[in-house]
Image (cartoon, rainbow, N blue to C red):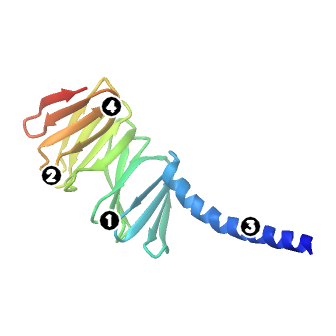
Amino acid sequence: MRKIILIFCFAILLLGCKKETVLLSKIDVLKNNNFGFASNDGFNCFIKENKIAVYSKDEKLLFEKVYDVPVSAFDLDNNSILIIGFLDGNLKEIDLKTQKESKIDKFFDSIKILTFSKNYQYILWVSKNNSVVIFDRKTRNFSMGAYQEEVYNFSFDENQKKMYIQFEKKLTILDFDKKIMLKELE
């Protein structure tokens, strides 16, 4: 009788672990550097090295895509456009609603940080060698600056007037329109 109870408990544990494994695999996607996750009102995007899987909110797989080069950075805008930066410097966008993919540009260096401005007009990225690039999605124009220090993050304020660049030990605030440095905070 004791063996039957132990076997029964062990079986319940195994069944529970199987369900937990599925949940943990999604958590791993969020925590591991080789993985990524982006979501908006209609889509969930899981990215692992060179593979992208896009799911609907009800967890149905919509499509998967495998690239020749690993994805190094990505972001998803409010219109369900997924922007992807690659280790070879390519920058692509996928309209998740239509699944149409288009190339934005080829940059000369690997893209390590990629994000949007708050109003989604600009795509902002940082290269492996700390070049900061601002791409205007409407005009298709670029602005660029290079730094000797490692760039950890950057963003615009709500009005798109000030740009904040975060380094290891300081924060630089720039006037985006005038292209001048306003101040540095250490």
Judged by depth in the image, the label closer to the viewer, 3 or 4, is 3
Name the residue rendered at 44%, 57% in the picture: 37
Q: Are marks 2 and 1 in contact (CB under 8 Å)?
A: no
Residue type, label 2 = Thr
Residue type, label 4 = Asn
Considering only order in the chain, which callout, 4 or 3, is on the residue closer to the N terminus? 3
Determine which quarter of the picture holds residue 89. top left
Q: Is residue 128 left or right of residue 142?
A: right
Q: What residue is shown with label 3?
A: 13
Q: Which sits in the foreground, 125 or 59?
A: 59
Q: For the residues marked 1 and 3, what is the alpha-carbon distance in whole angstroms? A: 40 Å
Q: What residue is shown with label 2?
A: 139
Outermost residue on the front side: it is: 2
Residue type, label 1 = Ser
Viewer can see residue 84: no
Judged by depth in the image, the label closer to the viewer, 1 or 3, is 3
Judged by depth in the image, the label closer to the viewer, 2 or 4, is 4
Q: For the residues marked 2 and 1, what is the alpha-carbon distance in whole angstroms? A: 20 Å
Viewer can see residue 92: yes
Disc assigned to residue 41: none
- The image position of residue 123, as x and y in percent, is 26, 49
Name the residue rendered at 58%, 64% in the picture: 23
Considering only order in the chain, which callout, 1 or 4, is on the residue closer to the N terminus? 1
Q: Secondary structure at mark 4?
A: loop
Disc assigned to residue 80: 1
- The image position of residue 74, as x and y in percent, is 38, 51
